[in-house]
Amino acid sequence: MEVQGRIKVIGETQTFGANGFRKREVVVTTEEQYPQHIMVEFVQDKTDLLNNYQVGQQVKININLRGREWVNPQGETKYFNSIQGWRIEALQQEPASGNVPPVPPMDAFEPAGELNEDEHDDLPF
């Protein structure tokens, strides 16, 4: 699965517990009719994948959906979901309209001359 959008936030790497579990979060805003702000977490050695990216950049992130079950002290079962990234790549920016060569004005074209109205037009339309 994948998520595409523009990077809104890149968090710092956080370290937890005695084993040194590492996590880093990135928020990507999708570009659709109703934009969504999707938080994706990168864990352990994957946290370094975010080092070369910056806010505002368009990216595609390959993700896995993770779910876990937790029983609280009162015996109630709770469920939690997370979106875990495992690969990220920059998307090519679409060329700006300024890169399209300008169309010459209509008066720059010479009118067609020497038309023979009597010639038969063989075009099928």
Image (cartoon, grey):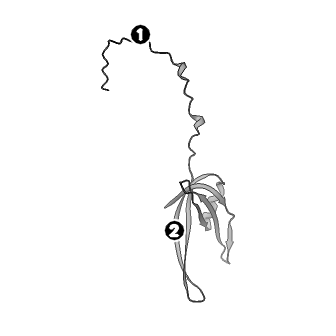
Q: Amino acid at mark 1?
A: Glu
| 2 vs 1, front mark | 1
CB contact under 8 Å: marks 2 and 1: no
SS type, badge 1: loop
Q: Residue at x 54, y 19 (%)?
A: 107
Question: What whole-number distance in Å separates the C-alpha atoms at marks 2 and 1?
Answer: 70 Å
Q: Residue at x 61, y 68 (%)?
A: 44
Q: Residue 45, relative to residue 54: is it above or below?
A: below
Q: Position of residue 89 (x, y in %)?
A: 56, 54
Name the residue tied to disc 2.
65
Q: Residue 77, relative to residue 110: is it above or below?
A: below
Q: Position of residue 63 (x, y in %)?
A: 53, 63
Q: Position of residue 80 (x, y in %)?
A: 55, 75
Q: Looking at this view, name the residue that lies furthest to the front.
A: 117
Q: Looking at this view, name the residue that lies furthest to the bottom.
A: 74
Residue 8, by quadrant, is bottom right
SS type, badge 2: strand
Which of 30 and 14 lies nearest the eye of the viewer?
Answer: 30
Residue 117, by quadrant, is top left
The circle drawn on residue 114 is 1
Q: Left or right: 11 with respect to 120?
A: right
Q: Residue 47, relative to residue 89: is it above or below?
A: below
Which of 124 and 66 lies nearest the eye of the viewer?
Answer: 124
Which of 33 and 95 lies nearest the eye of the viewer?
Answer: 33
For the C terminus, which image quadrant?
top left
Q: Position of residue 113 (x, y in %)?
A: 44, 12
Q: Residue at x 30, y 20 (%)?
A: 122
Which of 19 and 39 lies nearest the eye of the viewer?
Answer: 39
